[in-house]
Image (tube, rainbow, N blue to C red):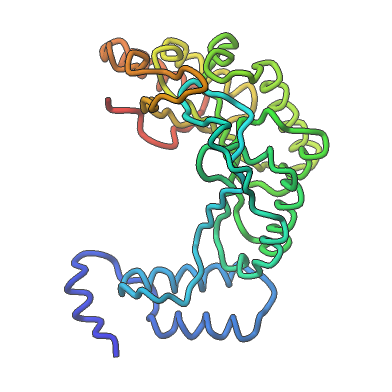
């Protein structure tokens, strides 16, 4: 028997999950026994059981992950100045579409992230099939993708729009020259056109999703243009962004990367002024910050 009162005393103010552990476990066992078609209720059952197993400290779990992060491949087509990706380190290993086709338990998972490590998931040769397989196995799952959006093709575009809930775009600049300096060999004009095409496809399909959010690795090269970012994002259909302070990468052999001399915090007063201007522009253009600004 589980001594719930003793566990409550150990957990302090940590909230108790809804229902009981026994009810959550029984609901999961019944769902597995019936092998019913996917439904939002499957996800709720799994979430409750995950919460109880975490609360009770159960090591041998009967639940499935609430979020699944999958590194589809370890290859990238960009050579970002702040990223340690190096092609000589790539193994060319990848998750196969058939691996996910067998994962019928995905119907219990809340969110699917086909990203892990330093890679571009859209480079995967089976990427269209993977999205469709996941959606077939788990029609109620949320699919989130981080991408540089350079590889959007006519064939891939409708698949992205019809399956994804959220796209986080590695933008990292508000001006062409800065973008092409920070993210070679990618081209600014192509990126903007692909983002426009995503909006056009959303309109064609009559979908509000995927929501577009921007990732912006802050450094001294893109600090001054930060206040220009919200207007740009609004013009190409973005709703949010996150500003990430540069973490100085370790050197690699194949190319030069940004160093500690490239951080934005050398002149904190100037950086904070740009932050104030940026936040003001975010309010004007209704761009949501998805995490707090760097505190240096």
Q: Is residue 237 above or below residue 3?
A: above
Where is residue 4? Give x, y as percent. 25, 81
Residue 129 vs 123, above or below: the answer is: below
Q: Residue at x 51, y 33 (%)?
A: 240
Q: Quadrant of residue 220?
A: top left
Q: Position of residue 61 (x, y in %)?
A: 43, 75
153 sits left or right of 58 in the view: right
Residue at 55 percent of width and 18 percent of height: 231
In percent of width and height, residue 226 lies at 45, 16
The quarter of the displayed image where residue 24 is located: bottom left
Q: Is residue 106 above or below residue 119?
A: below
Q: Nearer the viewer, residue 149 or 121?
A: 121
Give 204 or 246, whichever is nearer the viewer. Answer: 246
Give the residue at x 68% y 28%. 150
Residue at horizontal 50 percent and vertical 42 percent from the top:
117
Q: Quadrant of the C terminus?
A: top left
233 and 57: which is toward the camera: 57
* x then y, percent, for residue 201: 77, 35
Q: Residue furthest bottom?
A: 1
Q: Which quadrant does the N terminus fall into?
A: bottom left
Q: How many marks?
A: 0
């Amino acid at each position: 028997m589980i001594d719930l009162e003793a566990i409550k005393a150990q957990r302090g103010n940590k909230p108790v999950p809804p229902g009981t552990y026994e009810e959550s476990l029984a609901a999961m066992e019944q769902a597995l026994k019936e092998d019913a078609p996917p439904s939002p209720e499957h996800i709720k059952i799994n979430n409750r059981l995950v919460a109880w197993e975490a609360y009770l400290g159960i090591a041998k779990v009967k639940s499935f992950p609430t979020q699944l992060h999958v590194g589809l491949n370890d290859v990238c087509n960009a050579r970002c100045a702040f990223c340690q990706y190096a092609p000589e380190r790539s193994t060319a290993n990848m998750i196969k579409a058939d691996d996910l086709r067998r994962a019928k338990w995905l119907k219990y998972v809340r969110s699917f992230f086909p990203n892990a490590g330093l890679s571009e998931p859209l480079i995967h040769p089976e990427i269209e099939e993977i999205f469709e397989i996941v959606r077939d196995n788990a029609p109620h799952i949320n699919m989130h993708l981080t991408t540089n959006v350079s590889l959007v093709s006519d064939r891939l575009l409708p698949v992205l729009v019809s399956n994804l809930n959220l796209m986080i775009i590695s933008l990292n600049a508000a001006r062409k020259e800065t973008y092409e300096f920070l993210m070679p060999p990618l081209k600014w004009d192509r990126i903007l056109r692909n983002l426009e095409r995503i909006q056009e496809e959303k309109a064609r399909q009559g979908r509000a999703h995927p929501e577009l959010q921007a990732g912006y690795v802050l450094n001294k090269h893109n600090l001054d243009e930060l206040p220009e970012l919200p207007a740009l994002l609004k013009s190409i259909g973005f709703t949010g962004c996150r500003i990430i302070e540069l973490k100085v990468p370790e050197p690699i052999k194949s190319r030069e990367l940004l160093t500690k001399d490239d951080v934005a915090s050398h002149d904190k007063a100037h950086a904070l002024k740009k932050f104030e201007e940026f936040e003001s522009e975010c309010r004007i253009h209704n761009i949501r910050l998805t995490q707090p600004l760097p505190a240096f």
